[in-house]
Image: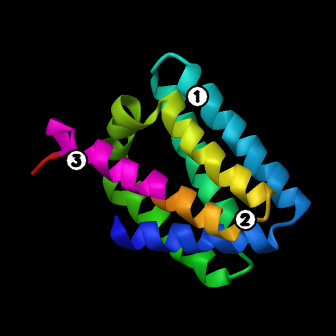
């Protein structure tokens, strides 16, 4: 999680500097999908909608960074998660991550990117991933 936190924070900081208006629109779209999923009853479909929107959100941040290595790295992480960790990830989203508070953490990232505030975007991403790790650590069913 530490590596992903650093990568996502750096990508968000660069995205704040280099994002296009179209990429910002995409981020707003995926943020809306996260909010919709967080407000929906917890079903397999709403959890899948959250997972898909979140993956697309982070991929768009990486693309907006203007650095293809961020994109490639996140695609690698997403592919591994989809192959090996999908059931655990879906369960974690259903219980710990699919809430308005987490959607607000994503909104803080988008708002900083919108303002072209690289430091705030990086900090918002770092805060989100730190909190995600804390939420996961509290889950007894995900502990070794």
Q: Specify the quadrant of the image occupied by residue 105.
A: top right
Looking at the image, do the residues carrying marks 3 and 2 touch, with CB atoms under 8 Å apart?
Answer: no
Q: Residue furthest left?
A: 144
User: Would you call the spot at circle 3 few (<14 residues within 10 Å), some (14-19), or many (20 or more)?
Assistant: few
10 Å crowding of disc 1: few (<14), some (14-19), many (20+): many
The first of marks 1 and 3 along the sequence is 1
- Decide whether the magenta segment is chiefly helix, strand or loop: helix
Rounded to the nearest whole Å, what is the CA distance between mark 3 and mark 2? Answer: 30 Å
Q: Is residue 64 left or right of residue 134?
A: right
Examine the structure image and report whether residue 21 is included in the region drawn in magenta: no
Q: CA distance from mark 2 to mark 1?
A: 27 Å
* In the image, residue 5 above or below residue 130: below
Q: Is residue 29 visible?
A: yes
Inspect the magenta stretch and tell me whether residue 140 lies in it. Answer: yes
The residues colored magenta run 127-142
Q: Is residue 42 left or right of residue 135?
A: right
Q: Are marks 2 and 1 in contact (CB under 8 Å)?
A: no
Front residue of this view, candidates 134 and 74:
134
- The residue that disc 1 covers is 37
Kindly identify which numbered label has been placed on residue 137: 3
Q: Position of residue 40 (x, y in %)?
A: 56, 19
x%, y% of residue 119?
A: 63, 69
Tell which circle, 2 or 1, labels the residue nearer the N-terminal end.
1
Q: Secondary structure at mark 1?
A: helix
The furthest residue to the right = 21
Q: Secondary structure at mark 2?
A: loop
Q: Position of residue 104 (x, y in %)?
A: 58, 38
Would you name the residue on which mark 2 appears? 117
Report if the CB atoms under discs 1 and 3 are less than 8 Å apart: no
**Where's residue 37, x and y in %?**
58, 28
In this rendering, position of residue 81 left or right of residue 21 = left
Q: Which residue is pictured at 63% across the width and 62% down the height?
A: 120
């Amino acid at each position: 999680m530490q590596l992903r936190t650093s990568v996502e924070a750096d990508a968000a900081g660069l995205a704040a500097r280099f994002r296009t208006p179209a990429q910002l629109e995409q981020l707003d779209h995926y943020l809306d999908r996260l909010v919709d999923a967080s407000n929906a009853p917890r079903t397999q479909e709403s959890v899948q909608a959250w997972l898909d929107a979140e993956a697309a959100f982070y991929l768009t941040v990486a693309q907006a960074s203007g650095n293809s290595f961020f994109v490639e790295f996140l695609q690698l992480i997403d592919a591994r998660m989809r192959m090996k960790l999908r059931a655990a990830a879906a369960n974690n989203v259903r219980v710990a991550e699919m809430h308005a508070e987490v959607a607000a953490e994503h909104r803080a990232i988008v708002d900083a990117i919108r303002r072209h505030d690289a430091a705030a975007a990086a900090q918002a991403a770092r805060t989100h991933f730190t909190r995600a790790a804390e939420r996961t650590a509290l889950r007894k069913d995900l502990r070794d």
